[in-house]
Amino acid sequence: MKTNLTRRHWYEWIPHPIVMLFIIIIVTTILSYILPAGVFEREMVDGRQRVVPGSYQRIEATPIGLMDMFKALPMGFKTASDIIFLVFASGVMFGMLEKSGMVENTVGTIVRQMGDRKRFLLVVLMTYIYGLLGIMIGFENNIAMVPIAAVMILALGGDLVLAAGVSVGAITVGFGLSPINPYTVGTGHNIAELPLFSGAWLRSILSFIGLSLLAWHNVRYFKRILADESQSLGKGLNTEGMTLSKPLQDYTISPNNRLVLGVFLTGMAITLYGIFKFHWYINDLSGVFIMIAIASAAAAGMNGTQFSETAFQYIGKVAPGAFMVGYATTIKEVMEMGNISDTISHELSQVLMTLPTYASAVFMSISQCAINLVIPSGSGQALATLPIMIPLGELLGLTRQTTILAFQIGDGVTNLFNPALGGLVAMLSLCRVPFDRWLRFIFPVTGMILLIAWLFLIFSVYIGYGPA
C-alpha cells in the first residue's frame, strides 16, 4: 500500500506572528543563561545615551526567570504606548474619512477617469509615492496613509497583499534606504562626526533602485493574479469597508466630499510642516490625527452618536495591530533584563576583526541584520552599535561613510520582514494582511534588494566612499 506524502512548502511552516514572537522571547530568555552578561558604558550626547567604544565589560549574570519573562509583556506595552495610541488614532481618523464617503468616492472617481488601461502605471506611481513618503517623512508617521492604498488597489482589481506591497513595502524601503533618514543616517553621521546627510548621492541611487525593484515586483504580482485569480495571496481576507460599493460610472466627488478631503489634506500639510519645522514625532502626530478625525466628522455632518460608534468600530479593526506593537516590544525588554544585547554587539565586532576588508563590510551589514531582530529601533540600534562599529571599521580599512551605509542596509532592508518591528506589524494589520502571507510576497524582492545593496556596499569600499 502506497502512502502519498504531500511535501509542505516553506511558508506553511511559518507560525502565527504571536507564536513567532513568543518563540523569540523564549529563545532570548534562554540566551540569558547561555551568553555572559555584559555592558558598555554610556555617555549623554545631545540628550541621548550612546555607547562608549572600548568600554565593554562583563558583569554578574542576570538570567531571566519565568516570572520576569512574563512580566516583560506589560513592560513592553508600556514602552510602546506612544505607537500603540498612534495606531488607534490612525484607525479613528480613517474611520471618519471612510464613513463620510470621501475615500470611496475620491478613489472611484480617480479610477473611473484613468481607466483600467493605466492601472499598472498607477501601481508603479503609488509605489514611488509611498516610497517618497518613507524617504521624506518617516516610518510610523505614514501609518494613516496605508488604508487609502488598500481602497485604491482593490478598486483597480488587486488584492490586499498587493496593497501592502504598494504602501507598507514602499514606505519601508523608502525609509530604510532613505538618503536623509534622520534616525539612522542622521544619528550615524552625528556619531561619526560627518557632515549631516553627506554622501547622499550613493544612497539616493540605492533607494531609487530599491523602490524600482519593488515596483517591478508589485506589477509582476498584479499581472499574475489578474491572469489567474488562484495565484492571489489575498484570498479570503476581509475587505469590508475597503471595496467600492457601486459601478465606476456612478462615482463623483460631491461638495461635501471635497470639504472632507480639504480637511484631510490640510491636516496632512500641517503634519508635514510640524515634522520639518518643529520636529514633531509620535505623540504630536496622534494629536493631529485625532483633530483631523473630529474635523472630518463635523464636516461630514456626523452627530455625537455617529462619531462614537464609528470610532469604536475602527478601534476594533486596528486593535490587533496595536496589540502586536506592544507584544513585539517585549523582546527589547527581555534583552535589557538579561543584559545580553551589548554582549551580542561586542562578540559580532570581534568576528569582524578576522575578515578581509570587502568581506568585513558585507558581514558588518549582515550582523546589523541580526541585531535588528532584537533592537528594531533604527536610532536605538545606531546608538548601541555604531560607536563600536565606526572605529572598528577604520581598523579594517573602511571609511566611516561605508560603515554607516553597512549599518543602514542591515537595519533598513530587514525591516521588510522583521516580526519584532511594531510599526510593520501595525501597518500590515491596517491592510488586514497576515504576516505569513506577507512573508511569501515580500521575501523574493527582499533578497534582490539585499544583493543589490551589498554590491553597492562593495563598490563603496572600492571607491573609498567619503563624506562628499
Image (cartoon, rainbow, N blue to C red):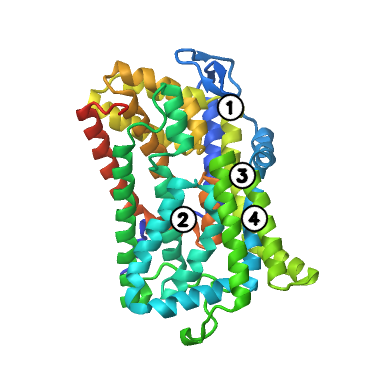
Amino acid type of the residue tagged 1 in the rendering: Gly
Q: Which picture quadrant has residue 311?
A: bottom right
Q: Closer to us: mark 3 or mark 1?
A: 3
Q: Give the spatial CA distance, label 1 vs label 2.
A: 32 Å
| Residue for badge 4 | 289
- Residue under the image location 41 percent in, 43 percent down: 176
Q: Amino acid at mark 2?
A: Val
Query: Is residue 442 in view from this perspective?
Result: yes
CA gap, disc 1 to disc 4? 37 Å
| 308 over 384 or under it: above or below | below
Outermost residue on the left side: it is 462
Give me the C-alpha separation between circle 3 and circle 2.
18 Å
Dot 1 or dot 2, earlier in sequence: 2
Q: CA distance from mark 4 to mark 2?
A: 19 Å
First reached walking from the N terminus: tag 3 or tag 1: 3
Q: Is residue 346 visible?
A: no
Q: Quadrant of residue 234?
A: bottom left
Residue 338 numbered mark, or none: 1
Circle 3 Cα neighbour tier, 10 Å, few/some/many (<14 / 14–19 / ≥20): some
Q: Nearer the viewer, residue 445 or 127?
A: 127
Above-or-below relation of 53 to 205: above
Query: Left of 114 or right of it: where is 337?
Result: right
Q: Which type of secondary structure does the marked residue at label 3 adopt?
A: helix
Place residue 218 in its image quadrant.
bottom left
Q: Quadrant of the N terminus?
A: bottom left
